[in-house]
Amino acid sequence: MDDPLRNGAKVWHLLPHDPSAIERLARSLKVSPILAQLLLNRNIAEPPDADRFLACPLNGMHEPELLPGVTTAVERIFAAIQEQKKICVYGDYDVDGVTATAILLTCLTLLKANVDFHVPHRLEDGYGLNNETLQKLSSNGVNVVITVDCGIASVEEAEEAHRLGLELIVTDHHEMKATLPRASALVHPRLPGTSYPFGGLSGAGVAFKLAWALCKKACGSPKVTPELREFLLDGILLAALGTVADVVPLLEENRVFVRHGLARMRSKPMMGLLALMKCAKLDTKLNVGAVDIGYAIAPRINAAGRLGTARLAVELLTTRNQQRADILADYLERQNQERQLMERRILQEARDQAAQYLQSSAFVLASSEWHPGLIGIVASRLVDQYARPVLMISLREGQPHGQGSGRSIPGFSLHEALQACTADLVGHGGHAIAAGFRILPEAIDAFRENFCSVAARQLGSNPQPHRLTLDAEIPLSALTSGLMQAMDQLEPYGSGNPAPLLLADRLQIIGEPRKVGGGERHLSFKVRQNGKELRAIAFGLAYRCDELMSQAGQCCLAFVPRWNEWQGYKTVDIEVKDFQAGPEAKLQ
């Protein structure tokens, strides 16, 4: 292997285990030692905590009135409903923003509000509140603007709303500036001076909490009407979609959202979502999981916002017309197919460009050929391959600013790094791991130098490969249906609760691996260990096929076990996250 970083290889670290602690927890919970070890690896050592984590009850969700700003927001919204003021739910174009918009729009419609919604056009409006849009809303008779998944950093735009006479209610979960926007209510789990028990909600999670409080207020009781109860169950499902797609930690309340949202998705998805599930061939899958949201549902919802307008995605999630649902789902499916083709081209071009900067601690890449709606996805793939922060800039003809999107590695805050380079930028916003920005084309070279200097000071001049933390070493023969059913209790997997990553060594590949999928990006093969054979799929690793076979097919795999469903039957397969050629694993 000529360059481990170039080839995407990772450093493997096998977590130590305490046999006595494993035995004690397994005996107390009456579970397998492997499940006990996986709980301990997640710092869940006490039986009551483990019981709560595994059971994940719906009443583990905090009462909505505890969320900072909710009580004030409910009062202001109810006053607007009673006075029949025109309300606009102002969302965002990603899955979290789309689902948050759908939640609040549906809630206000059920409460007989005079309500409409606005979702920004990614290319024309950009992220968040926009002064021109606020002016249009005001001229169209809107009295109240309720933001979802945006607005907490829109200080100047909030002043414009005030000047226009618009009442502004902000619900958000993003990072705040030193100054908070002027608004009638600010709903945010980490609002300064408050102490909400869980600060990791998504924008859709925040919107659900507000909707829940509105339903309780409308009924004058914690017990709501059957119609509103059905809506709230749909709302949990929508919040689950936004929570998984926005890669917020799947812990505490978010775990409750996703666990129970998935149950609703399997039993009674709303009409538009079911149509989309049919397009993704998930409607007959028995065990739809968070991974299906992340890899099948979210990209299709996102496709509308990335390539066009996200209004159609909101309509899909709120429509009661079956014919319209089918038309919209088919449109999103076609948009997603187009997105996949464009994404593969951009990824190859970005890899070629990145090859010029392999000695840098970060990548700042730019092109006039890249669609601004896709650069964030590609940046994520480059981070996974090169183990360093990646910023990508789309320079569109006729646009005065380049539009940038970045993804980072753990321990390096993009938000703080962009703040350190703010003199080079027109504007920026986002989180530690993901951020967006605008930049003048002539400032890119200076910005690249400054940003890479910030990265070098923090990360050093020689970025290290990704570190893969392995939960346990396990023989293939232990991967039984019983173990899989036990491990299913750890779901949903995602940020903060990754799927168990296991190690198997001394494997032999049977035959030749096949390159599969669009663009032949993936590897499909069979492995054998002591007579036990299993199918394996390695997503995105086809470019390392020669390396995999370099030791006559002997290899070690870092993998996640998964169910494979076919015609009503379930078998166990393995999803390869990384591999090492040769019989023995090299661990650090």
Image: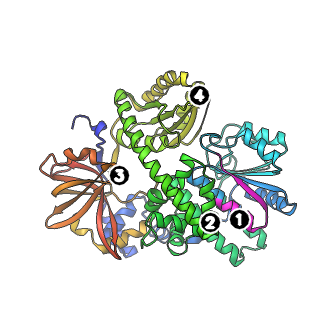
N-term mark: 2 or 1: 1
* CA gap, disc 4 and disc 1: 38 Å
In the rendering, which numbered label is found on residue 425?
A: 4
> How many marks on residues?
4
N-term mark: 2 or 3: 2
N-term mark: 3 or 1: 1
Other-residue count near label 3 (Cα within 10 Å), few / some / many at <14 / 14–19 / ≥20: few
Q: Nearer the viewer, mark 2 or mark 3?
A: 3
* CA gap, disc 4 and disc 2: 38 Å
Q: Nearer the viewer, mark 3 or mark 1?
A: 3
Determine the residue positioned at 57% across, 49% down.
305
The residue segment tinted magenta is: 102-120
Of residue 143 and residue 506, the one placed in the foreground of this image is: 143
- Label 2 residue SS: helix
Residue 112 is left or right of residue 586, and the answer is: right
Name the amino acid, label 3.
Answer: Gly
In the rendering, which numbered label is found on residue 235?
A: 2
Task: Check whether the beta carbons of the residues at disc 2 and disc 1 lie within 8 A of each other.
Answer: yes
- Label 4 residue SS: loop
N-term mark: 4 or 1: 1
Q: Mark 3 sits on what residue?
A: 518
